[in-house]
Amino acid sequence: MRTLIENLAFAITVDKDDSIIKRASMVIDGENISDIGPADDVARRHDRNKFDDIIDGTMMGVCPGFVDSHVHLSETLSRAVFPDDIDTRTWVFHWAKPFYAHISEEDELVGVFLGCAEMIRAGTTCLLDMGAQNDPATTVSAMKKIGIRGITGRHAADNPPAILPHGWSEEMVRHHFFPSAQAALAVLEETVDKWNGSAGGRIRCWVNIEGKEPCSLDLHIGARELAESLGVGTTYHLATSIEEADLCQHKHGKRPVQRIADRDGLGSNLVIAHGVALDDEECDAIASHNVKVAFCPGTSLKLAKGAAAFGRYPELMDAGVAVGLGTDGVSASGNLNLMRQLYVTAGLFKDARNDATLVGARKAIRMATIDGAKALNWDDEIGSLEVGKKADFVLFNLNHVEWTPYYDPAQALVWSASSASIAQTWINGIPVFKDGKIQTINEQEIFAEARKRSTRIIQRSGLSVRGVPKTTTLYS
Ligand SMILES: [Zn+2]
């Protein structure tokens, strides 16, 4: 299939020079972008009779597909179930885990479809999922069918709390917590062998672990080493809150990243999810080892993580660290819409530090695209609109109130537009979202299933009864 999209009002390429081409055309050959440039130049290079399809881009603008560098697809049925006045540790251990414990494979399938649908509608074309609650076969098959690109894995940990909180099931503990780091790594290696490279390479599988308190130091270290030996990456939660960092300091005499660094556990194939509570030495260690960071601004707002108060994301980026943007799970942030994260990120540090030069529209777009692709070690194929890269992109409808009028496309994209003006989302050369619909699934059926199943999970997990804690002493 050969498609010409001609006379686009703009193309935000996110190439190394941050080029924005006004009146651009783009050629898509199969899965790839085979030409992009000023419309007249592209027109001179091609015979219009040799395209299968020609799309008039006059009232459209294009940017690369967004890369969500931290999401929990398995969490999608828990939207707005947990309270919004609890901290990260309480949220994870007393609310999220009981919910996770009662997600069946069928629930997970529906949740992954639903999560991917929300993401694709908001322009996300690639994701890094923390991993499946059940067999990753379910997640992989749903990602494959809906047509999204991404990396998944399998939930794993090896250090259960001394007393299991209310709502945790024996079955979940057995599946999630391995008897040792070695046992966990053996299963994770099998998982990577089985699923990495699925769907013609569109789906990858990493050695992902939960990270922080529920994982031993050996598992943190071993996961990255195993990933390196398998030629893949790993991601885990770390320095996700000041409470976690303080607890780590208290129990182990070291801050979270320092503790990993002291065991030589940092490397370029590690994506730290959140990384909000860092000191100067930890920032230096992350930068010098080329570790990647997934910043999840929506979760930071909702769970009071402190990104605005003490997050070091601008400093990490100044030091050359690839900081991608993540939505986190739908319950952690409330949505899987990367455009919302883009908006918050562009302005959060400007306001917190009273400095208009921090982040801003262009840098936020880079974080949501090429920097995310770098974090996922996939920037050779995605993250920008350049010849030879995969055709993953978003087309905005400019005949829309959000774009009327505008001058600078980058500023309008971040500060003015929302996913409401997305006309099409293309992944791997295919318009997966267009004409107001995800083309690959029946969304209405998924919505109906999701509503039904969510209610049942809340009942099964006991989260509907009062008395679920609003603070925690777990692992302390
Ligand atoms: Zn997370």
Image (cartoon, rainbow, N blue to C red):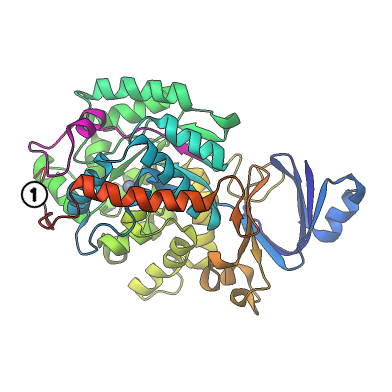
Q: Position of residue 301 (x, y in %)?
A: 31, 64
The answer to whether 293 appears left or right of 361 in the picture is left
* Mark 1: secondary structure: loop
The residue depicted at 27 percent of the width and 42 percent of the height is: 100
| Vertical placement of residue 162 versus 6, above or below | above
Q: Is residue 191 magenta?
A: no
The percent position of residue 141, horizontal first and vertical second, equals 49, 34
Q: Quadrant of residue 422?
A: bottom right
Residue 363 lies, with reference to residue 151, above or below; the image says below
Mark 1 close to ligand 1, CB under 8 Å: no
Residue 166 lies in quadrant = top left
Mark 1 lies on residue: 473
Relative placement, left or right, of 259 versus 205 is left
Left or right of 25? Residue 183 is left
Which sits in the foreground, 415 or 430?
430
Q: Quadrant of the C terminus?
A: top left
Q: Amino acid at mark 1?
A: Thr
Residue farthest along the bottom direction in this orientation: 405
Task: Check the image and report above or below for 129 versus 231.
Answer: below
Q: Residue 247, percent across and down?
A: 13, 48
Residue at x-position 27% and y-position 57%: 81
Residue 425 visible in the snapshot: no
Q: Give x and y (percent) for residue 203.
A: 52, 34
Q: Nearer the viewer, residue 1 or 25?
A: 1
Q: Nearer the viewer, residue 288 or 245?
A: 245
Judge whether residue 169 is colored magenta.
Answer: yes
Q: How many marks?
A: 1
The residue stretch that appears in magenta: 150-177
On the question of residue 140 being in view, the answer is yes
Secondary structure mostly taken by the magenta-highlighted segment of the chain: loop
